[in-house]
Amino acid sequence: MPVSIIILFVVMAVCFIIRMPVSFSMLAASIIYFIVSGNDMGQVFTVISGNMFSNYIMLAAPLFIFTANVMNQGLVTEKIFQFCNGLLGKFKGGTAQVNVLASLIFSGMTGSAIADASGLGLMEIDQMKKEGYDDGFSCAITAASATVGPIFPPSIPMIVYAMLSGASIGNLFMGGMVPGVLLAAMLMVYVAIVSHKRNYPRGEKYTRREFLRYTIQAIPALLTPIILLGGIYGGAVTPTEAGAVAALYAIIVSVLVYKNMGAKDLWKILRESARMTATLGLLVGTSMLFSYIIALEQVPNVITGLVMGITDNPYIFLLVVNIVFLLLGTIMDVSTIQLVFVPMIIPLVKAFGIDLVHFGVVICLNMMIGLSTPPFGMLLFIVSGMSKTPIKKVIKEILPMVTIMIILLFVVTYVPDIILWIPNHFGAK
């Protein structure tokens, strides 16, 4: 490899070590590359602005971020929790089961694990603690269930992956449906086993009249994923347009139906959404510049040649990728893994003849496992900080759940029809 590329990776590694933000790390490394290589620095602006302004898919991300913030501020999460509690609260360990089911429903609205853990999370953890659940377990199941968010559609990480790979965003959303439901089901089975073993209590039992009242109250919120996904798969809207529809519907529900959001709240949400979008935009823009340099220096071709020289078996390749990404997830942020490493292996995925939709869902699940994996899983710190529970207690309880997620990861990796059946029958050709 040219010296300039070696310097690019060395500078970025140093930036990561000194804890510089990912976007600034990629930008600094890229600028130094242009200086060392003698290439035109004007390419920095051309690549970032050209790709960002022409990328229609990426418009969906800020719209779903805004939707998630409206849902949390408008107390829509509370209505979902009450409805799920009416369904499952009467069972042993019912509130923990509600935790998982509510995350699955909420994931059909926001596509963000962070939004799930931050919105529903505190309410769920507080309720479980009141009922006598162990602090560590309450936090762990909240973090683990939040990983369903970006797997079941819509999904912000899948939107970014579609931008990086060129895969159909609609097919990616469809591909995440079955794995998302399977993950929720497996976590609920685990909760049932632990609840009986530890004699966790049954949740609050509602009368028929109370359950009917909570169901009616929750209907506007429950219609969100139906409108969202129905519009996409019915061909009425694109995923990007669906984000706009979801945002508008969330405002209508929060302001006119539940009446829990005013003008000041909306302004606060707009500011927070703008801040989060700016962070994401900077990440995506710098990753585009980094990917441009990688492509310019033909690094993927070098990597492809090396890997194909070692093995031409796609199953071994997928095994290695999963192990490497799982290890990266224990020490690195999801955005770093997705924006730095995924572009480098997409050519390999194509060379091995692996379906881009299949690989996209697999890699998304892999990265979500990283959010709950010690030592640096972001969800661990979120639930620990919100509940003031020592993180070592959360880690102890979440390890079996991470094992369950890893089992599902390898099942969907080697049985691609689990992911591809719905896209192949109902998706875009």
Image: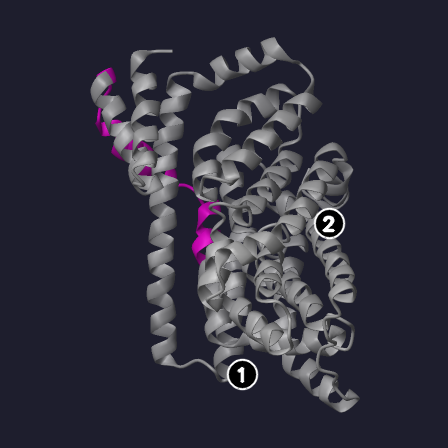
Magenta stretch encompasses residue 262: no
Q: Residue at x 34, y 29 (%)?
A: 13
The disc placed on residue 258 is: 1
Tell me residue 274's x, y (percent).
Answer: 34, 59
Magenta stretch encompasses residue 42: yes
Magenta portion: prevailing SS class:
helix
Q: Quadrant of residue 308?
A: top right
Q: Which residue is mark 2?
A: 178
Q: Nearer the viewer, mark 2 or mark 1?
A: 2
- Left-right relation of 202 to 225: right
Number of residues whose C-alpha sits closer than 10 Å to that of mark 1, classed few (under 14), some (14–19) or many (20 or more): some
Number of residues whose C-alpha sits closer than 10 Å to that of mark 2, classed few (under 14), some (14–19) or many (20 or more): some
Between residue 52 and residue 258, name the one nearer to us.
Answer: 258
Tell me residue 420's x, y (percent).
Answer: 73, 39
The region drawn magenta spans 37-63
Tell me residue 412's x, y (percent).
Answer: 72, 39
Between residue 151 and residue 140, name the one nearer to us.
Answer: 140
Amino acid on which the number 2 mark rests in the picture: Val
* Residue found farthest to the top: 309
In the displayed structure, would residue 380 be above or below residue 255?
above
